[in-house]
Amino acid sequence: MMRTHTCGELTANDTGKEVTLCGWVATRRDHGKLIFIDIRDRCGLTQIVFTPLETRKEQAKDTMSLTGFIPKESGDAYKMAQDLRNEFVIKVKGIVNKRPQGTINSKLHTGEIEILVKELEILNPSLNTPFEILEDIDIGEDTRFKYRYLDLRRRKVFNNLTLRSDLYKIIRNFLGPQGFIECETPILTKSTPEGARDYLVPSRLNPGRFYALPQSPQLFKQILMVSGIEKYYQIAKCFRDEDLRADRQPEFTQLDLEMSFVNEEDIFSLTEKLMQLILKELKGVEIRIPFPRISFDEAQKRYGSDKPDLRKELNSDFAFAWVIDFPLFKYNIEEKRWESEHHPFTSPRQEDLSILEKAPDKVKSRSYDLVLNGMEIGSGSIRIHNQELQERIFNIIGIDKENAHKRFGFLLEAFQFGAPPHGGIAFGLDRLLAILSGEPSIREVITFPKTSAGFCPLTDAPSDVDERQLKELNLSINPVRNTERPEKQKEISNGVKKGREGK
Ligand code: ASP
């Protein structure tokens, strides 16, 4: 390593040590005879001091604070330090010095010490940044996201990334030992019916044909149950082309899992133990399990919502609840037809099988939602594993046999080779992280988020493509299109079709 220590670790116990630190110039105060710089890396800040040689000698006499050491090269470093500006990347070698009385900063872990610099190397200069790298800044998201790499130098934003990394570790450490196998599923695939529009990717090798980006790994995880995987999980990217709002992004991350030979109780108790562990490890909070269960009807009646916020009732900062007994279908008034409340692979209750076609409005499903603080953070169901029942459901929601085979034939075929009973759940990790970090929007916990107009200010995506690329794909663009940049288009955040949440 180019450094001996990070910028967040030196204390008075290190006084007198010769150290080398690397980092960014966070602040610079030039007091004429003394230049103070806070050097920052991901671990913290350390104050470094440059003094011309003469000042050092005087100061040593006055304060007795330099432990008798006067670096002889400090004169050169001092000269160079005059050119330093915020966000320059530097390497400094120097001696750890206990700060003089009255200059100790008790808020900083390194606040008792400073480094008296002997040598300075400028590793890379920096342009003036478009905003100062401060904890509290009052600038728009467009600028923050365009310069997200600078935004991420801020502690608060950085902490959101480490929280995600810690969460993933907890999940993997919990599920692995319980026999779960982490499996990847394709991104270039076929449409998955989660109630949103698909993102399509044209195929060069199959002109006129398109892949869909997965709205979830739903079909693949069910097929993995047919494979005998028994316990699957994946931290999966999902893509849904929906109008965006604070808790939605075009791409988001789910913890997706599925198990064979289970019923609702197995999913509930696994989830509760996992959430209990997450809250304990990440927030130091003990939550009580089992979580309260509320039927969909009761939630609507008592709270006017299927995402009840029970914080006041339970008097806890983190109030989980299961919402159960959802209707299997909902009526689409515009299109005058029934559609699935969850997705069409959700099993109806056994006792409702006889009224499926007669009274679809009365049929309840075996699906469940996990709600935290009034937000849906997970949803899942016990699935249909019988091809005949699956076809009845498709029929009710207006997908005839031919269409069903065109869209999901591969799943229906797989189901004929001994599909075990199975069920699962998927959790919206961005929403969970936003709640855990107290952020108002999931954009704050996503490394490179898009604006509410679905635009990436950093890369300018989505962007135009070359004529040549379009030709290769056998595509042409209809010239009548909105040429305004998406971020300037008026945000349409209401009127979203109720489909399942993008968690
Ligand atoms: N695939 C479902 C969703 O994304 C979750 C599940 O049923 O497991 O909502």
Image (spheres, grey):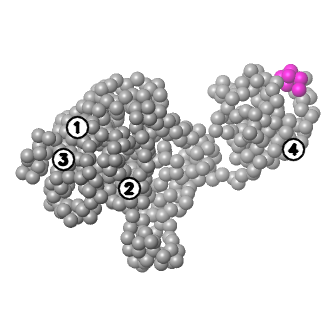
Which region shows up in magenta? 64-69
The residue beneath circle 2 is 214
Comes first in the chain, label 2 or label 3: 2
Are there few (<14), some (14-19), or many (20+) residues within 10 Å of tag 3? many
Using the numbered discs, state the Cα–Cα distance from disc 4 to disc 1 in whole angstroms. Answer: 70 Å
Q: Earlier in the sequence, mark 4 or mark 3?
A: 4
Q: Main secondary structure of the magenta part?
A: loop
Amino acid type, mark 2 = Pro
Between discs 4 and 1, the one toward the N terminus? 4
Find residue 8 and report its horizontal and vertical position in percent. Answer: 67, 32
Give x and y (percent) for residue 86: 71, 46
Residue at the location (34% across, 47% down)?
227
Image coordinates for residue 417, horizontal then vertical, percent: 26, 51
Q: Is 288 located above or below residue 459 in the figure?
A: above
Q: Residues within 10 Å of mark 1 (few under 14, many from 20)?
A: many
Q: Is residue 108 left or right of residue 297?
A: right
Find disc 4 in the rendering and name its residue: 79
Front: mark 1 or 2: 2
* SS state under label 3: loop
Compute the Cα span from label 1 to label 2: 26 Å
Residue 323 shows up from this direction: no
Tell whether 181 sits left or right of 494. right
> In the rendering, which numbered label is found on residue 19?
none
Residue annotated with mark 3: 328
Residue drawn at the location 42% of the way across and 60% of the way down: 188
Residue 183 visible to the viewer: yes
The verdict on label 3 being within 8 Å of ligand 1 is: no
- Identify the residue under disc 1: 324
Which of marks 2 and 1 precedes in the sequence? 2
Q: Quadrant of residue 28?
A: top right
